[in-house]
Amino acid sequence: MSSPLRLPWGTSARSSVGLEWELALVDADSGDLRQTAATVLDVLAPDGDNPRIKAEFMRNTVELVSGVARTVGEAGADLAQSMDDVRAITDPQRVELMCAGTHPFASWTAQKVTQKDRYTRIIDRTQYWGRQLLIYGLHVHVGVEDRAKVLALLRGMLPYVAHLQALSASSPYWGGIDTGYASNRSLLFQQIPTAGLPYQFETWEELEAFAGDMIHVGVADYFNEIHWDIRPSPGYGTLEVRVCDGPTNLAELLSIAALVHCLVEHLSTQLDQGRDLPNLPQWFVRENKWRAARYGMDAIIILDAEGNEELVTDAVGKLLVELEPVAERLGCADELAGVWEIVRGGASYQRQRAVAAANGGDLEAVVHSLVREMRVGHPLPLPPR
């Protein structure tokens, strides 16, 4: 048996928050991807040491990273400033910023991977599936002050995977076709062996034993190469929620991040009070993820171990009411209230399909609408039918 990998827990203030947003670089005219991330990083991170703007897996992508913040609003201000910094370089090149879980029509075969050892290892191991990871996501870190809470919080978050997947779903198109899914990204990503839903460990020692086994047999070189939808991030002392498709604008990003922020704090408070956290069998969690990826806001999700079910938007509405006091404490009441706008107005995948329908199926029009949403920072009105 291999030796466990010791995973010391970093110091992080309770319910501090950090955001990571993966953005695509697209041509202002054609809407196709531009592989110009190196140009941006040569200016903004010449020594690779800019903590706010980083390279990502593909050369068509930059990642914006907030500082450690008290509120999602503060973290969002960091992202907005970094976006302005990137635009100062990309605008003169007629390169636009765009985000969605996937690019609507770009060909994965034409994309190049960033030259980093860990990315090279991923491609060498995963081959066909790894080369298709033309995907964009949002990662929300929430500080956890006590390592003893982390795995309980992870398990407690799993019943809400479907809520987050449906609200953030923004990848109905892949390679120029409508996949029939609200989030094709989520199903693409889980094809690699280190991604997808996490295991439900009971103790930290079990997690360390797992990590030691994975490194011993060559699945990963470091723990952060385990790309679960929700995972502990020991170095930061955070619970990292990675299940969401990339939001197409800053307003929706902040709303979804506020929901994650409030959920983790709410569950942490319940642990402090000695209460049991929500629990859902692994098989129901997996089914819920698939339903939310397939049907998005129309998904009927499984609520509990007894198999009771509810429309996801109804479940989200009840959850928002429950979390209102938490949002007040965390200073994100306005951002959390924005989730209601997603429930009422629809998620990005629905807007993208509406734009395509209004333009005779033209997916370039979809990309240009995504670019405009990124520019204005909020969803655009649906086109007339």
Image (cartoon, rainbow, N blue to C red):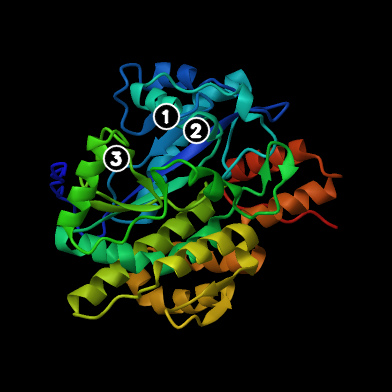
Between marks 3 and 2 in the image, the one whose residue lies nearer the viewer: 2
Mark 3 or mark 1, which is nearer to you? 1
Q: Considering depth in this image, is 108 or 102 the residue closer to the camera?
A: 108
**Residue 80 position (above or below residue 244):** above
Quarter holding the C terminus is: bottom right
Looking at the rendered structure, the kind of residue marked 3 is Asn
Residue placed under numbered mark 3 in the picture: 224
Locate the N terminus by quadrant: top left
Q: Residues within 10 Å of mark 2 (few under 14, many from 20)?
A: some
Percent of width and height locating residue 196: 43, 50
Disc number lying in front (2 or 1): 1
x, y percent for residue 99: 56, 41
Sort mark 3 into few (<14), some (14-19) or many (20+) by Cα contacts within 10 Å. some
Q: Would you name the residue on which mark 2 appears? A: 130
Residue that mark 1 sits on: 125
Q: Residue at x 50, y 23 (%)?
A: 59
Element under disc 1: helix
